[in-house]
Amino acid sequence: MDVFVYDSRLGIKVPQFETPFEELPLSERAHIIEVWEDIRGTIPTRVMELEQVIVSKLLELGEENNFEQSCRINSDIAELASIVNDLHIWYRVSAEVSEGKRHS
């Protein structure tokens, strides 16, 4: 049973439990914790990648003279910043994620 589902917006797998974590067998919980810690370890790299894209978009925005295009770039930046924020939230989630705790 795979409790991790790929979130294409975040670019990582996130936990999604059908059964509350506390009700799972101890061996299964230990495995979930191990997998989650591996996933959590990739979050800082993902954040850095997105921050580089944001910097690039900011430079592009500074050079853009078309108002509509500037609005699109600004919207892209806001979405990227939202993803970074959500990744920070997931990074702070301990391995013992409770049922239904989904930040997407």
Image (tube, rainbow, N blue to C red):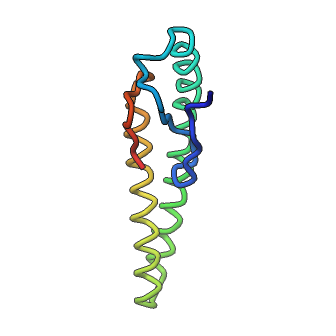
- On the image, which quarter does residue 67 sit in? bottom left
User: Picture coordinates of residue 66 (x, y %)?
Assistant: 45, 91
Direction from residue 25 to residue 23 in the image, left or right: left
Q: Residue at x 41, y 21 (%)?
A: 96
Q: Residue at x 43, y 82 (%)?
A: 70
Q: Does residue 73 lie above or below 38 as drawn?
A: below
User: Picture coordinates of residue 39 (x, y %)?
Assistant: 57, 31
- Total labels drawn: 0
- Residue sitting nearer the eye, 69 or 56: 69
Residue at the extreme top of the image, as rendered: 26
Q: Residue at x 41, y 72 (%)?
A: 75
Identify the image quadrant of the N terminus. top right
Q: Does residue 28 lie above or below 3 as drawn?
A: above
- Residue sitting nearer the eye, 27 or 23: 23
User: Picture coordinates of residue 55 (x, y %)?
Assistant: 49, 61
Q: Does residue 66 lie above or below 104 as drawn?
A: below
Residue at the extreme right of the image, as rendered: 1
Direction from residue 104 to residue 33 in the image, left or right: right
Q: Residue at x 41, y 25 (%)?
A: 20
- Residue sitting nearer the eye, 70 or 41: 41
